[in-house]
Image: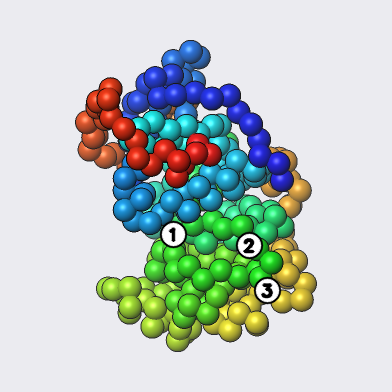
């Protein structure tokens, strides 16, 4: 995959409007491009925090991966740049907000809604795997809903391009969504994303994930034990799919067998899915987000706004070389 080149901009080309989300070392802001008045999401990350938390490799990897991928269910990056304090990623603005917010508002989704989102997530993850990328951070907070009701997966901070070994050893992700092999530091590969799809499908149908506890270690114990409670209302095919995705032994996990992702795609749970219709946008989504204009933020949480950065004109940037690809 060749890297897509985009025109270079700088911070002054954009007006910062409101926070859309916060992370460990940065924020995502809604911004307006001054020349055209179009809206974009801008991910702003403090260099000093990235370095302090030893995340330089992750950030450079995120930039490298997302600039090379192109899929209808993955958020588009327009360009990147840096200044003395921060690195910036300019992304398309996805007006419908996080799947997480819609799920919390509804409580839980019905079978057809859950199936629709699971199928679109499957197509995005399968695309990444075909390009030897493991995503490693699937959760409702990282799935956005676009204005037409289709998904856009975002935040590639934990994504990794696999090398010859097809495995990586970094402990990363959200506790409730971690596959057993990540917890056990056994080395992990693409199968962790299929585990996470099982967790996501369960959470959409039930309103909470299958393994939860008051602390991370309690969650890890339950994941390794692998006992799943299915309420009576669960669809029989959903139960079967989730059970096969949540196999503690990854050599028996659906998606990681001889036929790979085809086993998931051809599962009875997805028997009425029009896969080509999903990809070309002809399937009508179960939910169309409400918005009044392209810069509407009603579907996002509200945050306290930080003061703008003030960069002294004589400030020296000790980290510029670490982010030279920005």
> Is 194 positioned to the left or the right of 140 in the image?
right
Residue drawn at x 44%, y 69% as measured from the top left: 171
> Is 88 positioned to the left or the right of 114 in the image?
left
Q: Position of residue 316 (x, y in %)?
A: 31, 32
Report whether residue 175 is seen: yes
Residue drawn at x 76%, y 76% as measured from the top left: 258
Which of the marked residues, 2 or 1, is nearer the chain's N terminus? 1
Numbered-mark total: 3
Report whether residue 20 is seen: no
Residue drawn at x 39%, y 31% as measured from the top left: 83
The residue pinned by badge 2 equals: 162
Give the CA distance from mark 2 to mark 1: 35 Å
Q: Residue furthest top?
A: 35
Q: Position of residue 132 (x, y in %)?
A: 67, 59
| Mark 3 Cα-neighbour bin, 10 Å: few <14, some 14–19, many ≥20 | many
The residue pinned by badge 3 equals: 256
User: In the image, which disc is placed on residue 108?
Assistant: 1
Give the CA distance from mark 1 to mark 3: 28 Å
Where is the N terminus found, in terms of image quarters? top right
Q: Position of residue 232 (x, y in %)?
A: 48, 77
């Amino acid at each position: 995959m060749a890297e897509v080149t985009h025109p270079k901009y700088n911070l002054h080309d954009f007006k910062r409007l409101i926070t859309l989300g916060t992370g460990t070392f940065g924020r995502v802001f809604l911004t307006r491009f001054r020349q055209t008045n179009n809206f974009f999401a801008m991910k702003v990350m403090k260099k000093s925090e990235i370095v302090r938390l030893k995340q330089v490799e992750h950030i450079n990897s995120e930039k490298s991966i997302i600039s090379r991928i192109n899929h209808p269910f993955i958020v588009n990056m327009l360009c990147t740049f840096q200044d003395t304090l921060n690195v910036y990623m300019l992304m398309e603005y996805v007006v419908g907000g996080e799947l997480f917010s819609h799920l919390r508002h509804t409580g839980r989704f019905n079978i057809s809604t859950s199936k629709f989102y699971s199928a679109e997530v499957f197509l995005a993850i399968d695309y990444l795997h075909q390009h030897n990328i493991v995503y490693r951070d699937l959760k409702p907070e990282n799935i956005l809903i676009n204005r037409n009701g289709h998904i856009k997966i975002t935040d590639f901070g934990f994504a990794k391009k696999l090398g010859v070994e097809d495995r990586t050893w970094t402990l990363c992700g959200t506790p409730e969504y971690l596959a057993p092999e990540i917890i056990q530091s056994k080395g992990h590969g693409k199968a962790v994303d299929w585990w996470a799809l099982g967790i996501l499908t369960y959470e959409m149908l039930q309103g909470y994930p299958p393994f939860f506890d008051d602390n991370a270690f309690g969650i890890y114990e339950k994941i390794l034990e692998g006992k799943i409670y299915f309420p009576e209302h669960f669809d029989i095919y959903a139960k079967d799919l989730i059970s096969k995705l949540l196999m503690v032994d990854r050599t028996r996990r659906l998606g990681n067998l001889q036929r790979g992702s085809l086993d998931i795609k051809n599962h009875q749970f997805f028997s009425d899915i029009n896969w080509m219709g999903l990809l070309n946008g002809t399937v009508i989504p179960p939910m169309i987000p409400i918005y009044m204009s392209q810069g509407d933020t009603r579907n996002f949480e509200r945050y306290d706004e930080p003061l703008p950065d003030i960069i002294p004109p004589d400030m020296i940037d000790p980290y510029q070389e670490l982010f030279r690809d920005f």
